Amino acid sequence: MKVRARFGILALLVTSTALLLSACIQIDVESEFEADGSGTHSIETTIDRSIMDDEMMGAEFDEEGFDFDEVREEGEAAGFEVEEIDTADRVGVRLTTHVDDNSDMGDVLNDLFTATGGEGPPVEGFEGSFTESGGGIGGSNYRFELTVDGNALFEDEFAGDMEDDLDDGMDMDFGPDMLRQFMNLTYTVSMPGEITDHNGTDLGGGRVQWDIPFQGSETFFAESEDGSGLSLALILGIGVGALALVLIIVGGIVLMRPRKAPVDEPADPGTS
């Protein structure tokens, strides 16, 4: 099952109505880009530790057979670095990968999202790029643009699959509205240089964040500028200054050149 595999513990969580009162699942996708076009992408999936500590839910997790070693093996087999998260508040896993070229980064994000489950068909919910323009002594401009299709990430089959995983007789609507009650999904990008434009939430330090949609399609974008190069005005100023200096030097050389004394012409012998 696609959604069940992707969030293998999701059905277990919604069996307790109390868990719906606050978000207990956190999924954070992050991309950190470098000036050379490379980038590090990660997806972190965690749940509130109180869920694991709950006697009923803890037993369900044990019965489900969640095994981090198995998650690690599957993630590493897919080519990702795998890190277990175990803090006082949350438990989960983070998958990370590095990409040299992000001119077409949809595939790597789709693979990361798919790898959170290990089974089911591939996800095709991300499409976008990170590009650089400019360069040279004038600095560089960077643009990130990503279209996220919530329908592809959480298909209509979700409701039917979820109901199959729950006990018979439960009448619950497992649509996007319910998902929002106990799941938070964010996408965060880290850009080189200073952010100049975006349509998300500016976190400071070149970082911008968006909420991933549960349905419909949204396009995220962010632009930044690396001011380490010389600005156009400064370049023109240097050019004008250099030209003026050359003219001064040339003028000085001309003025300092010794002048030849005038030569007297011999008198005409035919005159008296």
Image (tube, rainbow, N blue to C red):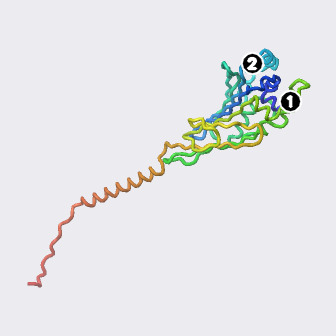
Residue 18, given in percent of the width and then of the height, sits at 79, 23
Q: Measuring from the top left, give residue 99's x and y in whole percent.
A: 64, 36
Name the element at disc 2: helix
On the rendered structure, is 269 left or right of 222? left
> Which numbered dot is residue 159?
none
Report which residue position mark 2 lands on: 52
Q: Name the residue under label 1.
A: 172
Residue at 66% x, 30% y is 96
Point out residue 158 in the picture as x, y percentages from the top left corner: 83, 33
- Vertical order, 260 against 111 (above or below): below
Q: As drawn, is 179 to the left or to the right of 166?
A: left
Give the class, few, some or many, for how many residues have Cα within 10 Å of label 2's Cα (few <14, many ≥20). some
Quarter of the picture containing the N terminus is top right
* Up/down of 211 relative to 270, above or below: above
Give, as a three-letter code, the residue at label 2. Met
Q: In which quarter of the image is residue 190?
A: top right
